[in-house]
Amino acid sequence: MHVLLVEDDALVGSGIQSALEVEAFAVDRVATVAEAEAAMAALTTDLVVLDIGLPDGDGLALLRDWRAAGRRVPVLLLTARDAVVDRVTGLSAGGDDYLLKPFDLDELLARVKALLRRAAGFAAPVLTHGTIAFDPAGREVWRDGVAIDLTRRETALLERLLYAGASVVTNDQLKDSLYGFDAEIEGNALSVHIHNLRRKLGRDVVETVRGVGYRLGPERTDTPR
Ligand code: CA
Protein backbone atom coordinates (compact mmCIF):
# COMPACT_ATOMS: atom_id res chain seq x y z
CA MET A 1 0.00 0.00 0.00
CA HIS A 2 1.18 3.51 -0.74
CA VAL A 3 1.50 6.24 1.88
CA LEU A 4 2.01 9.92 1.08
CA LEU A 5 3.90 11.34 4.05
CA VAL A 6 3.76 15.13 4.46
CA GLU A 7 6.17 16.15 7.21
CA ASP A 8 8.68 19.01 7.25
CA ASP A 9 10.67 17.81 10.27
CA ALA A 10 13.41 15.72 8.64
CA LEU A 11 14.08 13.58 11.70
CA VAL A 12 10.42 12.80 12.40
CA GLY A 13 9.80 12.27 8.68
CA SER A 14 12.63 9.82 8.13
CA GLY A 15 11.65 7.89 11.28
CA ILE A 16 8.07 7.48 10.05
CA GLN A 17 9.22 6.61 6.54
CA SER A 18 11.57 3.87 7.79
CA ALA A 19 8.94 2.39 10.08
CA LEU A 20 6.41 2.26 7.22
CA GLU A 21 8.94 0.79 4.77
CA VAL A 22 9.88 -1.96 7.20
CA GLU A 23 6.18 -2.89 7.11
CA ALA A 24 6.33 -3.03 3.29
CA PHE A 25 4.55 0.25 2.57
CA ALA A 26 5.70 2.24 -0.45
CA VAL A 27 6.30 5.77 0.85
CA ASP A 28 6.70 9.14 -0.86
CA ARG A 29 7.76 11.86 1.55
CA VAL A 30 7.29 15.57 0.93
CA ALA A 31 7.82 18.54 3.25
CA THR A 32 5.59 21.38 2.03
CA VAL A 33 1.98 22.12 1.08
CA ALA A 34 3.08 22.79 -2.50
CA GLU A 35 4.86 19.44 -2.79
CA ALA A 36 1.93 17.65 -1.21
CA GLU A 37 -0.46 19.19 -3.74
CA ALA A 38 1.82 18.17 -6.61
CA ALA A 39 2.21 14.61 -5.27
CA MET A 40 -1.54 14.23 -4.77
CA ALA A 41 -2.16 15.33 -8.36
CA ALA A 42 0.51 12.98 -9.75
CA LEU A 43 -0.03 9.70 -7.95
CA THR A 44 -2.65 7.48 -6.39
CA THR A 45 -2.02 7.11 -2.70
CA ASP A 46 -3.83 4.78 -0.32
CA LEU A 47 -3.34 6.90 2.79
CA VAL A 48 -1.91 10.29 3.79
CA VAL A 49 0.02 11.03 6.97
CA LEU A 50 -0.28 14.81 7.23
CA ASP A 51 1.59 17.12 9.57
CA ILE A 52 -0.56 20.18 10.30
CA GLY A 53 2.23 22.73 10.71
CA LEU A 54 4.04 23.07 7.38
CA PRO A 55 6.55 25.77 6.33
CA ASP A 56 4.48 27.16 3.45
CA GLY A 57 1.00 26.78 4.88
CA ASP A 58 -1.51 24.94 7.00
CA GLY A 59 -2.03 21.19 6.63
CA LEU A 60 -5.65 21.57 7.72
CA ALA A 61 -6.38 24.05 4.92
CA LEU A 62 -4.81 21.61 2.47
CA LEU A 63 -6.97 18.82 3.85
CA ARG A 64 -10.12 20.95 3.52
CA ASP A 65 -9.23 21.60 -0.13
CA TRP A 66 -8.75 17.88 -0.79
CA ARG A 67 -12.09 17.02 0.81
CA ALA A 68 -13.84 19.83 -1.07
CA ALA A 69 -12.38 18.37 -4.28
CA GLY A 70 -13.89 14.99 -3.38
CA ARG A 71 -10.68 13.20 -2.36
CA ARG A 72 -11.70 10.53 0.11
CA VAL A 73 -8.27 9.04 0.86
CA PRO A 74 -7.85 8.27 4.60
CA VAL A 75 -5.82 10.98 6.36
CA LEU A 76 -3.94 10.59 9.64
CA LEU A 77 -3.12 14.01 11.09
CA LEU A 78 0.03 14.76 13.09
CA THR A 79 0.42 17.80 15.25
CA ALA A 80 2.38 19.28 18.10
CA ARG A 81 -0.41 21.70 18.90
CA ASP A 82 -2.80 21.67 21.79
CA ALA A 83 -4.62 18.37 21.74
CA VAL A 84 -8.18 19.35 22.58
CA VAL A 85 -8.55 22.28 20.18
CA ASP A 86 -6.81 20.56 17.30
CA ARG A 87 -8.58 17.26 17.65
CA VAL A 88 -11.92 18.95 16.96
CA THR A 89 -10.71 21.19 14.12
CA GLY A 90 -8.64 18.37 12.61
CA LEU A 91 -11.45 15.88 12.48
CA SER A 92 -13.98 18.47 11.30
CA ALA A 93 -11.58 19.43 8.49
CA GLY A 94 -11.87 15.86 7.21
CA GLY A 95 -9.13 14.04 9.10
CA ASP A 96 -9.85 10.37 9.87
CA ASP A 97 -7.57 10.09 12.86
CA TYR A 98 -5.14 12.14 14.81
CA LEU A 99 -1.80 11.70 16.62
CA LEU A 100 -0.24 14.20 18.97
CA LYS A 101 3.55 14.56 18.82
CA PRO A 102 5.59 12.97 20.19
CA PHE A 103 4.17 9.53 19.51
CA ASP A 104 5.39 5.93 19.32
CA LEU A 105 6.03 4.64 15.81
CA ASP A 106 4.21 1.45 16.83
CA GLU A 107 1.17 3.56 17.61
CA LEU A 108 1.39 5.27 14.23
CA LEU A 109 1.64 1.93 12.42
CA ALA A 110 -1.36 0.58 14.31
CA ARG A 111 -3.43 3.67 13.40
CA VAL A 112 -2.39 3.51 9.74
CA LYS A 113 -3.40 -0.15 9.46
CA ALA A 114 -6.69 0.45 11.26
CA LEU A 115 -7.54 3.36 8.92
CA LEU A 116 -6.82 1.30 5.80
CA ARG A 117 -8.91 -1.55 7.14
CA ARG A 118 -11.79 0.75 8.04
CA ALA A 119 -11.66 2.50 4.65
CA ALA A 120 -11.95 -0.90 2.94
CA GLY A 121 -14.85 -1.96 5.15
CA PHE A 122 -13.08 -4.80 6.95
CA ALA A 123 -14.08 -5.15 10.59
CA ALA A 124 -11.56 -7.83 11.61
CA PRO A 125 -7.78 -7.38 11.60
CA VAL A 126 -7.33 -10.30 9.19
CA LEU A 127 -8.60 -9.61 5.65
CA THR A 128 -10.36 -12.51 3.96
CA HIS A 129 -11.58 -13.23 0.46
CA GLY A 130 -13.11 -16.67 0.04
CA THR A 131 -10.46 -19.21 1.05
CA ILE A 132 -7.70 -16.59 1.16
CA ALA A 133 -6.73 -14.78 4.36
CA PHE A 134 -4.15 -12.04 4.89
CA ASP A 135 -2.85 -10.64 8.16
CA PRO A 136 -1.51 -7.08 7.55
CA ALA A 137 0.26 -7.06 10.92
CA GLY A 138 2.33 -10.23 10.41
CA ARG A 139 2.17 -9.98 6.58
CA GLU A 140 1.16 -13.64 6.38
CA VAL A 141 -1.10 -15.21 3.77
CA TRP A 142 -3.11 -18.40 4.00
CA ARG A 143 -5.16 -20.41 1.54
CA ASP A 144 -7.55 -22.95 3.03
CA GLY A 145 -5.80 -22.34 6.35
CA VAL A 146 -2.39 -23.29 4.92
CA ALA A 147 0.36 -20.65 5.06
CA ILE A 148 1.50 -19.60 1.57
CA ASP A 149 4.98 -18.23 1.00
CA LEU A 150 4.70 -14.99 -1.00
CA THR A 151 7.43 -12.49 -1.81
CA ARG A 152 7.24 -8.95 -0.45
CA ARG A 153 5.91 -7.62 -3.78
CA GLU A 154 3.39 -10.41 -4.23
CA THR A 155 2.11 -9.79 -0.71
CA ALA A 156 1.84 -6.04 -1.37
CA LEU A 157 -0.05 -6.73 -4.58
CA LEU A 158 -2.51 -9.07 -2.90
CA GLU A 159 -2.97 -6.55 -0.10
CA ARG A 160 -3.80 -3.72 -2.52
CA LEU A 161 -6.36 -5.89 -4.32
CA LEU A 162 -7.94 -7.05 -1.06
CA TYR A 163 -8.36 -3.46 0.11
CA ALA A 164 -9.99 -2.59 -3.22
CA GLY A 165 -12.62 -5.31 -2.80
CA ALA A 166 -14.68 -5.66 -5.97
CA SER A 167 -13.22 -2.49 -7.53
CA VAL A 168 -10.77 -2.57 -10.41
CA VAL A 169 -7.27 -1.34 -9.54
CA THR A 170 -5.53 0.26 -12.51
CA ASN A 171 -1.96 -0.59 -13.54
CA ASP A 172 -0.81 2.86 -12.42
CA GLN A 173 -2.50 2.52 -9.03
CA LEU A 174 -0.87 -0.85 -8.48
CA LYS A 175 2.55 0.50 -9.43
CA ASP A 176 2.13 3.45 -7.05
CA SER A 177 1.05 1.08 -4.27
CA LEU A 178 4.00 -1.22 -4.79
CA TYR A 179 6.82 1.10 -5.69
CA GLY A 180 5.92 4.74 -5.02
CA PHE A 181 6.11 7.62 -7.44
CA ASP A 182 9.77 7.89 -8.37
CA ALA A 183 10.61 4.23 -8.79
CA GLU A 184 11.80 2.92 -12.14
CA ILE A 185 9.79 -0.15 -12.95
CA GLU A 186 10.47 -2.64 -15.67
CA GLY A 187 7.62 -2.87 -18.14
CA ASN A 188 6.47 -6.37 -17.32
CA ALA A 189 7.32 -6.49 -13.60
CA LEU A 190 3.67 -6.17 -12.61
CA SER A 191 2.50 -8.97 -14.88
CA VAL A 192 5.25 -11.24 -13.55
CA HIS A 193 4.07 -10.65 -9.97
CA ILE A 194 0.45 -11.28 -11.04
CA HIS A 195 1.51 -14.52 -12.72
CA ASN A 196 3.29 -15.71 -9.57
CA LEU A 197 0.35 -14.75 -7.38
CA ARG A 198 -1.95 -16.88 -9.55
CA ARG A 199 0.50 -19.77 -9.49
CA LYS A 200 0.61 -19.74 -5.69
CA LEU A 201 -3.00 -18.87 -4.83
CA GLY A 202 -5.01 -20.28 -7.73
CA ARG A 203 -5.52 -19.10 -11.30
CA ASP A 204 -8.67 -17.10 -10.66
CA VAL A 205 -7.46 -15.22 -7.57
CA VAL A 206 -6.86 -12.21 -9.82
CA GLU A 207 -8.95 -11.16 -12.81
CA THR A 208 -7.42 -9.17 -15.63
CA VAL A 209 -9.61 -6.30 -16.76
CA ARG A 210 -8.24 -5.81 -20.21
CA GLY A 211 -6.80 -2.37 -20.91
CA VAL A 212 -7.57 -1.16 -17.39
CA GLY A 213 -5.97 -3.22 -14.65
CA TYR A 214 -6.83 -6.00 -12.24
CA ARG A 215 -9.29 -6.96 -9.55
CA LEU A 216 -9.85 -9.85 -7.20
CA GLY A 217 -11.48 -12.89 -8.73
CA PRO A 218 -14.80 -14.26 -7.51
CA GLU A 219 -14.95 -15.15 -3.84
CA ARG A 220 -14.66 -18.92 -3.63
CA THR A 221 -15.28 -21.22 -0.72
CA ASP A 222 -13.40 -24.12 -2.34
CA THR A 223 -10.00 -24.11 -3.98
CA PRO A 224 -9.89 -25.12 -7.65
CA ARG A 225 -7.05 -27.35 -8.68
CA1 CA B 1 5.78 20.60 11.14
Image (cartoon, rainbow, N blue to C red):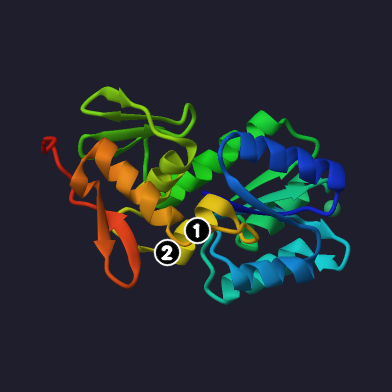
Q: Local crowd at mark 1 within 10 Å, few (<14), some, or many (≥20)?
A: many
- Say whether marks 1 and 2 touch (CB < 8 Å): yes
Image position, residue 128 (x, y; %) = 29, 38
Q: CA distance from mark 1 to mark 2?
A: 6 Å
> SS class of the residue under badge 1?
helix
Along the horizontal axis of the image, is 190 left or right of 109? left
Relative height, residue 12 to residue 60 (above, below): above
Amino acid type of the residue tagged 2 in the rendering:
Asn
Residue closest to the far top: 146
Along the horizontal axis of the image, is 215 left or right of 52? left
Classify the position of the C terminus by image quarter: top left
Q: Local crowd at mark 2 within 10 Å, few (<14), some, or many (≥20)?
A: some
Amino acid type of the residue tagged 1 in the rendering:
Lys
Q: Quick check: can you spot residue 75?
A: no
Residue under circle 1?
175
Camera-side residue of 103 and 215:
215
The answer to which quarter of the image holds residue 129 is top left
> SS class of the residue under badge 2?
helix
